[in-house]
Image (cartoon, coloured by chain):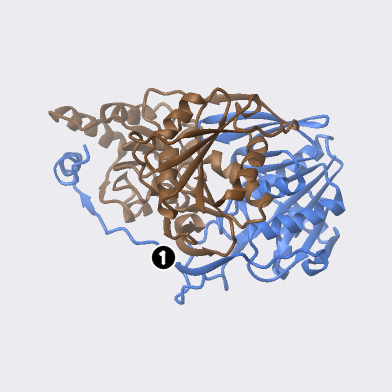
Chain colours: A brown, B blue
């Protein structure tokens, strides 16, 4: 039986992690169908049909789908599940909110946040905030799987031409009403997908001092991250938080400034390709994961860093 | 309004866990255990709502082995009125826990069920959503703000794009984010008082729920270690290495 991928989108276009989830789905079975549930989401459905790994698109339209409420989405997918062996989506807040609701209706034990497909019934997933990896075999007939987006490459986004089939909407769940969404807008790359992330911790000492980080991030075209300690201290808003309770990031370059490296922070960044730590405490645990460690006062090091960057002829973007 | 709060006993968040040599799990013997951190936020929020005169009773429930009762006792020490301990040994998957909680909800008839958004041991992030599916109740996951308005809640949720606000009718499930509040510490007199508060013990087998696992944990292993890096002497060397050695800038 085929795999059903749940597309994440904003009604206008696909959200980027749908491409990573599509890759994971295609590793389970080459026959991947994708369902898109939304309101006036035809353009996003078309994008979905152009992913070469997707063989068929199921499109469900309804006013009550406009805001992606799990209580409205779950019945649609439960009904479609009859024809599929696996249901797959990203383990971001969209998928985390939705998938268990589907799994419970199907009486299936969900496998959350997998980082590798070992076989169609066996998966690798991190536990204890990434401090251990568990190999899990699912014995349920239908498998509900959420995938860690940063552990799978995005699939090709053009070249496919899957047929788009309309599917009937389900009834509205009226006990949950959407009120508003406050999206944090920024000219910088999104933290979850940025090639470079520059993060500050409690060592920054104040929100004002984050401008030292901002300057460097702008120069490098990087996203700005923060440790939980910096967020809790009010230096920066919590959408910047990297860690077990924030975002998990896997950039090519992660620069940790004034971050000691608590377990919960490391869980969010230690899979980065190259890690730089700048900290005046030479014993800070962050150095144990850093490829390049600089033991220095950040208030001296950051302006020098900026100076050195300015000296470079070219900077990769 | 009556609030049921589910709490789980996990390895304390400050403990660096160790994987067992035989690959069957992580070492839990002689390891400090605590309440799952966001479950503390769930208890705190329920107690605050009661203190504001908007709830009449806060009941703490846990599902697990004998010692799991410590988490209920701790909830009682910070303001829950009474406790329930559903006794069961062995590994329980979130699906099984949500089925047990469904039985407790049928019996207790709470207006709200609170719990942490995720347990920090298995990191599944499922139980609240599964329970709300089984009950066909609204779910407000990853809550960082809760306003109680008569028979509705206005809940702000932490989502990847920022914040989302929804309104849900009771009865409802809320899973709590660490940012929801600052959990209080139990005072010594309250710890003493909590010892007199009742905890009902229920055997999971009496609830008629099939809790047998559906998943097999084939192996638990250490994640691959990162290669030890180097210390650089100064910023100039760092930038040179990033440019010419790592080739990332």
Residue beneath the point at 82% across and 32% down: B151
The spot of residue B229 in percent (x, y) is 25, 55
**Total number of numbered labels?**
1
Tell me if residue B94 comes above or below residue A302 in the rendering. below
Q: Is residue B26 visible?
A: no
Residue in the foreground of this view, choosing between A35 and B244: A35
The spot of residue B32 in percent (x, y) is 58, 65
Residue beneath the point at 43% across and 36% down: A162
In the rendered view, does B151 fall on the left or right side of A9?
Answer: right
Q: Quick one: label 1, few (<14), some, or many (20+) residues within 10 Å?
A: some
Residue in the foreground of this view, choosing between A184 and A307: A184
Residue in the foreground of this view, choosing between B125 and B27: B125
Residue beneath the point at 39% across and 61% down: B223
Element carrying mark 1? loop
Task: Give the residue at the far bottom of this rendering.
Answer: B22
In the rendered view, does A302 fall on the left or right side of A110?
Answer: left
> Label 1 lies in what chain?
B
The spot of residue A88 in percent (x, y) is 51, 47
The residue indicated by pointer 1 is: B222
Q: Quadrant of residue A226?
A: top left
Q: Is residue A218 visible?
A: yes
User: Which quadrant: the C terminus of chain A?
Assistant: top left
Q: Quadrant of residue A69?
A: top right
The spot of residue A126 in percent (x, y) is 47, 57
In the rendered view, does A227 fall on the left or right side of B174?
Answer: left
Tell me if residue A211 comes above or below residue B138 in the rendering. above
Residue beneath the point at 59% across and 61% down: A140
In the rendered view, does A297 fall on the left or right side of A242?
Answer: left
């Amino acid at each position: 039986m085929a795999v059903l991928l749940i597309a994440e989108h904003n009604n206008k276009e696909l959200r980027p992690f749908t491409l990573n989830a599509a890759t994971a789905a295609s590793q389970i079975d080459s026959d991947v169908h994708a369902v898109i549930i939304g309101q006036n989401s035809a353009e996003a459905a078309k994008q979905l049909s152009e992913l070469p790994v997707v063989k068929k698109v199921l499109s469900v339209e309804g006013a009550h789908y406009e805001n992606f409420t799990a209580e409205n989405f779950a019945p649609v997918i439960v009904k479609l599940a009859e024809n599929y062996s696996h249901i797959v989506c990203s383990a971001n807040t969209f998928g985390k909110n939705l998938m268990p609701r589907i799994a419970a209706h199907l009486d299936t034990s969900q496998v959350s946040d997998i980082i590798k497909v070992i076989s169609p019934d066996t998966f690798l997933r991190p536990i204890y905030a990434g401090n251990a990896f568990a190999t899990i075999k699912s014995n349920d007939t239908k498998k509900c799987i959420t995938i860690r987006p940063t552990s799978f490459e995005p699939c090709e986004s053009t070249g496919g031409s899957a047929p788009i089939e309309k599917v009937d909407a389900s009834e509205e769940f009226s006990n949950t009403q959407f009120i508003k969404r406050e999206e944090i807008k920024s000219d910088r790359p999104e933290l979850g997908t940025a090639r470079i992330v520059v993060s500050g911790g409690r060592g920054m000492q104040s929100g004002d001092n984050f401008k030292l980080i901002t300057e460097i991030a702008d120069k490098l075209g990087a996203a700005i991250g923060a440790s939980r300690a910096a967020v809790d201290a009010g230096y920066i808003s919590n959408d910047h938080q990297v860690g077990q309770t924030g975002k998990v990031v896997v950039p090519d370059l992660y620069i940790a400034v004034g971050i000691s490296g608590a377990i919960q922070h490391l869980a969010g960044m230690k899979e980065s390709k190259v890690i730089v730590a700048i900290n005046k405490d030479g014993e800070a645990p962050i150095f144990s994961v850093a490829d390049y460690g600089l033991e220095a006062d950040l208030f001296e090091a950051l302006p020098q860093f900026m100076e050195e960057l300015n000296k470079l002829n070219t900077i990769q973007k | 309004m009556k609030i049921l709060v589910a709490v789980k006993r996990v390895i304390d968040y400050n403990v660096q866990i160790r994987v067992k040599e035989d690959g069957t799990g992580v070492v839990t013997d002689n390891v400090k255990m605590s309440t799952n951190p966001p479950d503390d936020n769930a208890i705190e929020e329920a107690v605050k709502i009661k203190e504001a005169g908007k709830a009449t009773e806060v009941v703490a429930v846990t599902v697990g082995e004998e010692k799991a009762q410590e988490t209920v006792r701790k909830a009682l020490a910070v303001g829950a009125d009474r406790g329930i301990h559903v006794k069961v040994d062995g590994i329980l998957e979130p699906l099984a826990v949500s089925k047990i909680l469904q039985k407790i909800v049928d019996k207790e008839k709470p207006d709200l069920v609170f719990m942490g958004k995720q347990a920090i041991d298995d990191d599944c992030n499922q139980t609240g959503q599964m329970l709300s599916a089984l009950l066909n109740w609204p779910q407000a996951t990853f809550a960082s703000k809760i306003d109680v308005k008569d028979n509705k809640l206005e809940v702000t949720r932490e989502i990847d794009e920022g914040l989302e606000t929804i309104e849900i009718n009771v009865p409802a499930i809320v899973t709590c984010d660490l940012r929801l509040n600052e959990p209080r510490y139990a005072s010594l007199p309250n710890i003493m008082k909590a010892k007199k508060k009742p905890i009902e013990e229920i055997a999971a087998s009496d609830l008629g729920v099939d809790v047998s696992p559906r998943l097999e944990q084939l192996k638990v292993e250490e994640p691959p270690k990162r290669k030890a890096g180097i210390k650089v002497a100064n910023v100039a060397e760092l930038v040179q290495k990033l440019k010419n050695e790592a080739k990332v800038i």
